[in-house]
Image (tube, rainbow, N blue to C red):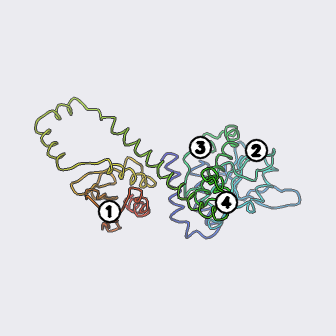
Amino acid sequence: MDFEERLAALAAKVKNQRAVIQTEEATKNAFIMPFISTILGYDVFNPLEVVPEFTADVGVKRGEKIDYAIMRDGEVQILIECKSSTSALSLEHASQLFRYFAVTNARIAVLTNGAVYNFYTDLDAPNRMDEKPFLVLDLADIDETLIPELLKLTKEVFDLDSIISAAEELKYVGALKREIAAQFREPSADWVKFFTTRVYEGAFTQKVREQFSSLVTKAAKQYLNEQVNDRLKTALGAAAAVPAPLSAGSAESITSQPVAEADLDRDTEIETTPEELEGYQIVKAIACGDVKPQRVTYRDAKSYFAVLLDDNNRRPVARLWFNGKKQKYLGTFDDAKVETKHAIETLDDIYEHADIIRATVRSYA
């Protein structure tokens, strides 16, 4: 497996097992040691590379231990402090990291609960660990833009200078993205006021704030949906504009009369509409959280448009019943492959059934 596949595999393991992993030691064994081994590439059984229960006495603090120290050429490079997968990470959990960071040569510190990995360095003051991470890896929602930076931390291509030079931008861009996401989920009073005063000329009273709180949230969600749909339309347009190359043999067969007549008969019975293709792209985008995009295909039929896994009729992902003149339906499947039709008004309504679609794909994968 390549790096991204290993990362996805570990993310799936965390998702499937996190509910039953209750202790810190279980978290280390199930999630964190595999992260050190399969993602960062270090041998957890080689004390020259990974030292568990690393001890470095600090002032009057004697015998304190950090969970793991990753070594390179006999020097500590990365310190890792672990918490139970049931714990939410906070600076209160990082007191030992702060102390050890100051007395070792480590420039990278990691605080993790096996699902979320907070990476710290010393941007604010030399040899003093920052209070805010420069990189946050959440295995439940992997930010693909961080993968190249994570690669720099692996044993094979470890590049400390490159990591540190990029850390400041990563730190603030990541923090801004998380803050924007939080504001989209639940806008603060300042966020609501910021936009309201740009579109509303009256006084920003309590009543106005209450009115625009819901409007700002609604507008933000609609804007995001429109951006997604615009990208899908652009992708569909590009796909339609590029004809598939034909070999000499296939060109000859297409010009033959029997094939042309068969194509004509087929095309008069089945019409693949842009709306069906757009719906397919939405289903495909949902499914791609669990499988590679090329595995999600489609076949159009007279009465419905089928989305399949691996172009296999025995692996239906969803069906689009768009041929009716009035009501449109999305067909989803349970574990027994029994179809349930859901009435939808717009293509955006497909996202409301994303969990069912992902569960169906996972059952095949």
Q: Amino acid at mark 3?
A: Leu
Q: Residue furthest left?
A: 258
Circle 4 residue: 189
For label 3, the crowd category at 10 Å Cα-Cα, with few meaning under 14, some 14 to 19 and many 20 or more, is some
Circle 1 residue: 331
Q: Are marks 2 and 1 in contact (CB under 8 Å)?
A: no
Q: Residue at x 67, y 64 (%)?
A: 206
Q: Secondary structure at mark 3?
A: helix
Q: Gap in Å between the C-alphas at discs 4 and 3?
A: 39 Å
Q: Report whether 191 appears left or right of 262.
A: right
Q: Position of residue 198 (x, y in %)?
A: 62, 49
Front residue of 48 and 308: 308
Name the mark nearer the viewer: 4 or 3.
Answer: 4
Q: Residue at x 88, y 57 (%)?
A: 59
Front residue of 22 and 90: 90
Q: Amino acid at mark 2?
A: Leu
